[in-house]
Image (cartoon, helix red, strand yellow):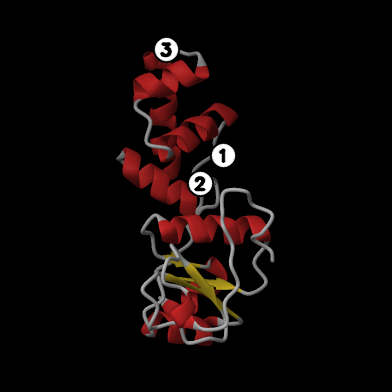
Amino acid sequence: MRLAVFGDLAVNEVAYVDETRNADVLVADTVDASRSAAPVLYLVKDSNEASQAIARGARGVMLRTAAPRRLHTGVRAVADGFVIIDEEVAEGVMPHACARVELIEPLTPREQQVAQLLAGGLTNKEIAQRLGITEHTVKFHLNGLLRKLGVSTRTEAVVQAARLGLLIL
């Protein structure tokens, strides 16, 4: 029901995994959906359930209490081939994989915009056109972004910004 508000998703409730033949993603909580042909996003109550879901082949695990927008993002990411592990249970599933990294200094609003457009796969030229600035200025903001995130590539910048919750993927 929390996903029904999003117009880009066709949401169907089913009682059995066998009824999910044409699904792009199956969202499950108490049902063992390991036989599903579709990738499965499990809604879990804690890291113990998350570990069990990953062991059964889940493509994603999120807390049952996840906000609708966050759940929507998780469904879209799993549909696009990503593996999703809710930050709240990640330490229990992958110990030490979520080390906290503090920013050297906060991103400027323009650096945040550049990061978001980077996440969309845009080139410097496309970012410049979208923001109404020059490519040189995009490079300036990109260098600041890389420096503040402590990374050296565009891909690392997107990953790090997402880990820090600075991007909506």
Mark number, residue 106: 1
User: Does the residue at mark 1 contact the one at mark 3 (Cβ under 8 Å)?
Assistant: no
Report x, y in % for residue 98. Answer: 44, 66
C-alpha gap between disc 1 and disc 3: 23 Å
Report x, y in % for residue 166. Answer: 54, 46
Is tag 2's residue or tag 3's residue first in the polypeptide sequence? Answer: 2
Question: Of helix, strand and loop, which one carries label 2?
Answer: loop
- Horizontally, residue 124 falls left or right of residue 10, namely left
Residue sitting at 44 percent across and 16 percent down?
129
User: Does the residue at mark 1 contact the one at mark 2 (Cβ under 8 Å)?
Assistant: yes
- 157 vs 34, nearest the viewer: 34
Which residue in the protein does label 2 denote? 103
Is tag 1's residue or tag 3's residue first in the polypeptide sequence? Answer: 1
Which residue in the protein does label 3 denote? 134
Please state which amino acid type lies under the numbered disc 3.
Thr
Task: Identify whether 40 is placed above or below 130.
Answer: below
